[in-house]
Amino acid sequence: MRQRPAHRPLCRVHESEVPADRRRGGEIRTLLSPRNAGSVSGFSGVARLAPGERIAEHYHPYSEEFLYVVEGSLTVDLDGQPWRLRPGDALLVPPGTRHRLRNDGTAAARAVFHLGPLAPRPELGHVDTESTEPGGGSR
């Protein structure tokens, strides 16, 4: 009989238990990660954007990002090209692709994301390409 390794515990977390990260815009909650769940292949979470909010442009050198829109609508700029997403749409963002999420609709938007594989070190996983300050442009 196959058994789960003892060093790999099960982990369940509710998004209300995770503080919102607003450093890059919007409200990002990383729900399952190496830090809290012991994941080894990636991490996942949820992003919420109020109308007019955005998550600043960035890219992931090592990871691809899977994005699924749960509610509301989003425009995702991929290397400068806008892609409009509505509830039920999924999008794959390949490694190295500059991307920004914008809620240019009238209702709040919520999307689930997963990134993998992990970067060799956490600080290498995310590269900002624009400021998160209002009116901030590309670097």
Image (tube, rainbow, N blue to C red):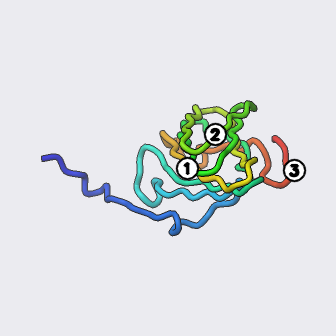
Q: Are marks 2 and 3 in contact (CB under 8 Å)?
A: no
Q: Residues within 10 Å of mark 2 (few under 14, many from 20)?
A: some
Q: Tell which of 88 and 17 is nearer to you.
A: 88
Q: N-terminal of the two: label 2 or label 1?
A: 1
Q: Which residue is mark 2?
A: 85
Q: Which mark is residue 70?
A: 1
The mark found on residue 136 in the picture is none
| Between discs 3 and 1, the one toward the N terminus | 1
CA–CA distance between discs 2 and 1? 10 Å
Specify the amino acid type for callout 1.
Val
Location of residue 62 in the rendering, given as x and y in whole percent from the top left corner:
55, 36
**SS type, badge 2:** strand
Q: Amino acid at mark 3?
A: Gly
Compared to residue 57, the image places residue 30 above or below, namely below
Q: CA distance from mark 2 to mark 3?
A: 24 Å
The reply to whether residue 65 is in sight is no
- Disc 3 to disc 1, how far (Cα)? 28 Å
Image coordinates of residue 115 in percent, x first then y, are 52, 43
Q: Quadrant of the C terminus?
A: top right
Residue extending furthest toward the left: 1
Q: Look at label 2 and name its amino acid.
A: Leu
Dot 3 alpha-carbon crowd within 10 angstroms: few under 14, some 14 to 19, many 20 or more: few
Nearer the N terminus, badge 2 or badge 3? Answer: 2
Residue behind mark 3: 135
Q: Nearer the viewer, mark 2 or mark 3?
A: 2
